[in-house]
Amino acid sequence: MSEHTVSAYDQELTELAGKVAEMGGLAEKAFSDAVSSLVSQDLELAKVTIQKDERLDTLQQEVEVKLIEIIARRQPMGQDLREITAATRIANDLERIGDLAKNVAKRVIAIDSDLQSKKLAIGVEHMTELTLSQLKLVLDAYTRRDAEAARRVQEADAEVDAIYTSLFRELLTYMMEDPRVITQCVHLLFCAKNIERIGDHATNIAENVYYMVTGERLPEDRVKMDETTFSA
């Protein structure tokens, strides 16, 4: 972040980045806790995850207000304008990640101990590990202003899509072989789709981080490897 003759300006930009970083930590934890509650069928953890989403919503609104104040007072240009534009876009993606994590937690309550076979959730766990890793990487890239790390996150999105497609087919096979697992498999399919969408938002963040740092855009026509027609 560049230094300005007006120290209050630097403080405002630092405060804005701090709010986004706080949102990143909350979104990451919400995602991790939501899937943990799914795998362990921890209803209390699921409920807490849902309740904590309000803090993300509040922070996202605070980022928007701060953005308007900075534009009105400072009329930013160049790197500064990229900084604050990226901040509000990233905040929007993080708020959506929180919503998707909350959706997973709501599925835990809907399943309510019907997840009789942990084997069915193994694919979801694997998909979560990769997606969570990408989210951690892109949040670190934002903090460090690391364009190269942001580029790697975008490239890894295809792997998340491929895992989702494989998991989709696996769960459909389970349902055809044993109708007794249809309900839990449907819930897991919705959870998997939410996780896949979290991966998409991590990629959006990566694109904004890259632009913020370099002033250039990553290719937007990345190939989506999701070969299913299922949508949550």
Image (spheres, rainbow, N blue to C red):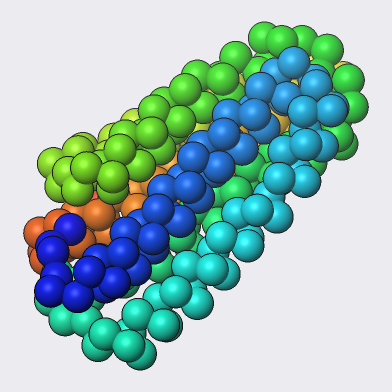
Along the line of sight, the residue nearer the viewer: 183 or 18: 18
Residue 120 position (above or below residue 220): above
Residue 2 position (above or below residue 28): below
Residue 31 position (above or below residue 208): above
* Residue 48 image position (x, y, % from top left): 78, 36
Q: Which quadrant, please, contains the N terminus?
A: bottom left
Q: Can residue 81 be seen from the camera position used here?
A: yes
* Residue 114 image position (x, y, % from top left): 88, 21
Q: Can residue 107 be seen from the camera position used here?
A: no
Residue 85 position (above or below residue 30): below
* Residue 43 image position (x, y, % from top left): 84, 27
* Residue 44 image position (x, y, % from top left): 84, 28
Q: In this view, does 160 lie to the left or right of 1?
A: right
**Residue in the image at 13% along x and 64% along y:** 3
Along the line of sight, the residue nearer the viewer: 177 or 89: 89
Q: In this view, does 126 lie to the left or right of 148?
A: right
**Residue in the image at 25% along x and 54% along y:** 209
**Residue in the image at 32% along x and 88% along y:** 73
Along the line of sight, the residue nearer the viewer: 148 or 67: 67
**Residue in the image at 50% along x and 50% along y:** 23
Q: Is residue 231 left or right of residue 162?
A: right
